Image (spheres, helix red, strand yellow):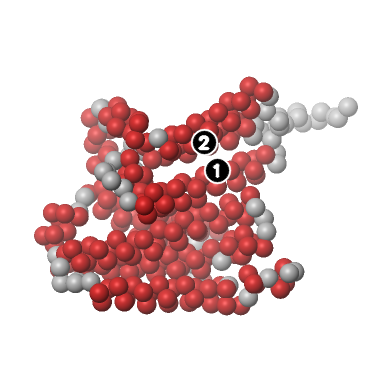
Amino acid sequence: MSQSQSIFNHIYLNKWNLFWLTSIPMSLIMTYVMIQHDLTTGDGVSEMIGFSVRWAVPLIYIVTAASAVYILFPNTFTKWWFRNRKYIGLTFAVAMGWQGTFIYIMSTFFRDYYFEDVYLLRNEIEGSIGYIFLAAMVVTSFKFGSKYVNGVQWKIIHKSGVYFLWAYAYTVYWWALYYYDDPVLFEYIFYWLGFAAFALRIFAWGKKRARNSSNPNLFLSTTGYFLVIFGLVIAYSGLTWRETATNILLAPKWSANLELWLPFWPFEPFFCFFIMGLGVMILTPKEKQKPLGEKPI
């Protein structure tokens, strides 16, 4: 089948048609499940918050990985994925709108339940920042909003927003696996999908760097590959090191105070990415620039 005949070029699978094709069924399912729950109790509303999140999380992962998969695996499907990341992102915004509605109901009508069983200052800060980013991204996705920012500002808003929203979702499931007891299957799935989404971005960054890099020597190659593999091990083995690392990092009083209000501090869920990113950087050293005026031999 030629590219022009590909199903991924079908009008109903692109742009606004894709948005309606995904957001309407999701909203109908959300409405149906909502009717089945008792929203006159805090427990019922809390369950709907969790249900709406499980729709939103895969969508932000898909948006996060969109550019990376196209760089790493350029083909008709990944081009379609990359081309429609805006509309997938808007479907994510609809899912987050549902979550925001249930959070509003919880915090307004079940305040005692909310502040006793749900509220945590840092979670509130992270969630609020996430919604601020989401609102800015949605507004600037349309001409009436984007006209107030230049290209650099638009890029900062959207890239920072995607990173923050991905990080918020990813860290929830990192902690579910490596702090809380008895994680369930979907938490494992969402953790590893979130890990894969950002790992792909690191590898795509490495592929772009490799275009203008020199070949690393044996020592650098060995070190780089070791760090990438070690990062994968760190991502898998959080149960063995998380408690010790957290205790060490939060031992200073200033660090313990930062944990109360600084999102994601002290960044344990991201250690694997720091290590993998360093490994990829070592594997793609920048080619030395020849001095100006030097003529080739």
Percent x, y for residue 268? 36, 37
> Among all residues in the image, which is located at the extreme left?
112
Q: Residue furthest top?
A: 219
Secondary element under disc 2, as helix, strand or loop, is helix
Q: What amino acid is found at the position of numbered circle 1 in the picture?
A: Ile
Residue at 26% across, 43% down: 181
Q: In this view, does 41 lie to the left or right of 273?
A: left
Going from N to C along the chain, the mark reached first, 1 or 2, is 1
Where does residue 98 sit, x and y in percent of width and height? 33, 69
Question: Compared with residue 116, is residue 46 higher up or lower down, i.e. above or below?
Answer: below
In the picture, residue 79 is in which quadrant?
bottom right
Q: Which residue is drawn at 58% across and 62% down?
A: 81
Residue drawn where x is 41% and y is 66% of the image: 93
> As rendered, which of 49 and 165 lies closer to the eye?
49
As rendered, which of 24 and 208 lies closer to the eye?
24
Residue 275 visible in the current orientation: no
Q: Which of 164 and 242 is in front in this view?
A: 242
Q: Is mark 1 on a helix, strand or loop?
A: helix
Marks 1 and 2 in Cβ contact (< 8 Å): yes
Residue at label 1? 202
Q: Position of residue 293 (x, y in %)?
A: 81, 30
Q: Which amino acid does label 2 sit on?
A: Met
Residue at 30% over, 73% down: 33
Per the model, the C-alpha gap separating discs 1 and 2 is 8 Å
Query: Circle 2 sits on which residue?
Result: 276
Is residue 9 rendered to the left or right of residue 140? right
* Quarter containing the N terminus: bottom right
Q: Is residue 188 above or below residue 30?
A: above
Quick check: can you spot residue 67? yes
Dot 1 surroundings within 10 Å: few (below 14), some, or many (20 or more)? many
Q: On the rendered structure, is 173 left or right of 116?
A: right
Compared to 171, does 224 lie above or below?
A: above
